[in-house]
Image (cartoon, rainbow, N blue to C red):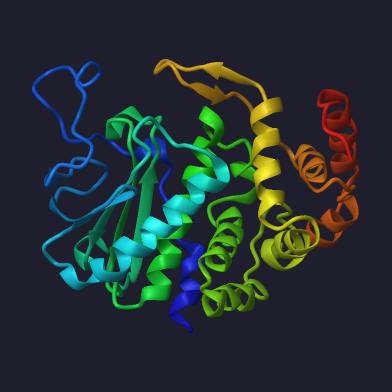
Amino acid sequence: MKLYLKIFSICAVAMSMLASCEKDDTNEATTKVEFAPEVIREKWWDFRSEMHRAYLDDQVAVYLASDVDSNIVRWAGPNMNKVWKYTKATYGAYGEDGRLLVFAHGPEYLEPGGVFFATLAGYMDGTVNYRNMLVATSSVWQDTMTMMAVMTHEVSHIIEGSSYGIKGSPSAKLWGDSQFADIVIFDTFLAMGWNDWAQEVIRNGQTNGVNYPNPNRRNYWFRDWWYPLYMKYGKTQLLVKYMKSISENVHTKINWEGFKEYTEDLNLGEFVHFMSGAAGADLKAQAKIAFDWTMENEQQLINAKEDYPNIKY
């Protein structure tokens, strides 16, 4: 499906770019905001719509703009319930309440020629009153597979940016916006039993190359890194072990909001070191296939073994 190819180039906006949330007249820092009121007036990023709650359960709340067909909640609500429930069962809790807010817009906020756009915030972001949320604007809500991939893509950013009680993603500068998202989408689709959709992720991954981390070649993250490692070294547990290992070893600080936050980004050698620990095997040979391997990367790996001696493989 040609439209689906666009999923992997979504320009998801970082959590910190979300400008502001609905406000009381009192101090937001001390006011507990109702998690999922019937109506929310958006005041974050470029979104300024009155959103009406169309679906609510113990996992998610779905809000619709006036230009969205209300029939989408028949699949969006139950499907996102399953995705979010699986995410928490796999990676742990996300905040005191733990539910996910989904805001669905029609094409109102799309740039000319755009098909969809999405962004997110996690429960450690005060600009959205410390709630997990995603916002999606689209002209193709009728395409269930595409939009489930779009929304799961945003969930992947919550996973990398809010897991195990720590804010930030030390790996983000390496894998960019979509490369971790692709394996999370694949893993989630498999877990949901959406096997045809998962096969579509595999097909797209064969030609989805980017110019990072090695700017001198095409890097096929899904084809040459994630998929072979996922299939050989524990599938979902490979991802879980990597995220858990990062949380236990990479340096953090307490930020101004009182949350732990990562203070450093991983280089390629460190990334391969942590991934090797998650796999229980030396992955340098696979890194050579996926990204090439320079003398600088080799020194990074040597240093990583010294700096993070608890990582064994």
Which quarter of the figure is the C terminus placed in?
A: top right
Residue 164: x percent and y percent?
55, 32
Q: Residue furthest bottom?
A: 1
List x then y, in percent, for residue 58.
31, 47
| Closest to the observer, 170 or 232 | 232
Picture mark count: 0
Considering every residue shown, the one lying at the far front of the view is 58
Q: Is residue 80 shown to the viewer in this render?
A: yes
* Extreme residue in the left direction: 25
Figure check: 115 above or below 243: below
Q: Residue at x 60, y 78 (%)?
A: 199
- Residue found 51% across the figure and 75% down from its top: 5
Query: Is any atom of residue 11 visible in this view?
Result: no
From the viewer's perspective, tell me whether residue 19 is left or right of residue 201: left
Q: Give the vertical position of 260 relative to 88 (above or below).
A: above
The picture places residue 112, in percent across and down from the top left corner, at: 27, 69
Q: Residue at x 71, y 55 (%)?
A: 215
Viewed as shown, does residue 80 lie left or right of 35?
right
Quarter assignment of residue 304:
top right
Could you say which is closer to the camera, residue 32 or residue 221? 32
The front one of 18 and 53 is 53
Compared with 274, 198 (above or below) is: below
**In the image, residue 252 lies at what x, y percent?**
60, 21
- Write down the quadrant of residue 43 in the picture: top left
- The residue lying at 16 percent from left, 68 percent from top is 70
Q: Is residue 48 left or right of residue 298?
A: left
Q: Is residue 36 left or right of residue 208?
A: left
